[in-house]
Image (cartoon, helix red, strand yellow):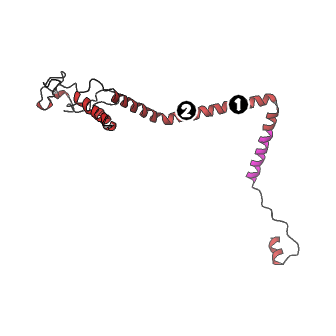
Amino acid sequence: MQFILYHLGLSSQKPDPLQIPVPIDREAAGQDYLQGRRELLKTLLDEKTRRVWIRDRCREAEHRRAHVIARWHADRAPDCEQARQTVARLERLARLPRQLPESIRFAVRDLKRQGRFQMALKELDRFYDYDGAIPASLPSDHRADVDRSDCAHHVVPQGNGKSEAVSKLSCQDVPSH
């Protein structure tokens, strides 16, 4: 108020300089900071308490580091598992199993020679799941455990061109038929 009166010429007395009040929260935070620094300095100046303080800080840092490493591994576990499965598929592609029918073996071999590895992997995946077992969801035309001798459309020529039964299951036993 004195400032306004002085500048309007209504008062001859110069006003006190303006002071911005310091918020109480900032002042309390500053006091807490200074108190913490004093205690830290006091701790570091005493040799026994300094060793305990350093040991505690090292343990806390080790725990934080172990937690960060565990979180890193947990975040990347799906990627690692996918990479393992991809390596297993590529190993299967490199060493084709004997149980594959010859037509599939030759098709995969030709695709590999052409450098079309993705197509070769897809060809293998049609007949095997990622665990290496024969998937039950394949059509009975491609399953080796199905007897195709009683259905004319399922007669599969074996090695010498003759039709032979592969197993004792019949087409009626296969749900995908």
Label drawn at residue 56: 1
Could you tell me the amino acid type at mark 2? Ala
Label drawn at residue 160: none
Q: Main secondary structure of the magenta part?
A: helix
Dot in front, 2 or 1 = 2
For this rendering, which residue is in front, 67 or 166? 166
Work out whether residue 146 can be spotted. yes
What's the magenta region?
A: 22-39
In this picture, is 17 found above or below 57?
Answer: below
The quadrant in which the N terminus is found is bottom right
Q: Position of residue 33 (x, y in %)?
A: 76, 45
Which image quarter: residue 59? top right
Distance between mark 2 and mark 1 Cα atoms: 21 Å
For this rendering, which residue is in front, 1 or 27? 27
Q: Which residue is mark 2?
A: 70
For this rendering, which residue is in front, 54 or 153? 153
Find out whether residue 25 is within the magenta segment. Answer: yes
Residue at 80% x, 73% y: name it: 4
Residue at 26% x, 26% y: name it: 100
Residue at 82% x, 34% y: name it: 45
Q: Residues within 10 Å of mark 1 (few under 14, many from 20)?
A: few
Find out whether residue 33 is within the magenta segment. Answer: yes
The quadrant in which the C terminus is found is top left
In this picture, is 145 found above or below 60?
Answer: above
Give left or right: position of 20 versus 81.
Answer: right
Could you tell me the amino acid type at mark 1? Asp
Give left or right: position of 71 versus 157.
Answer: right
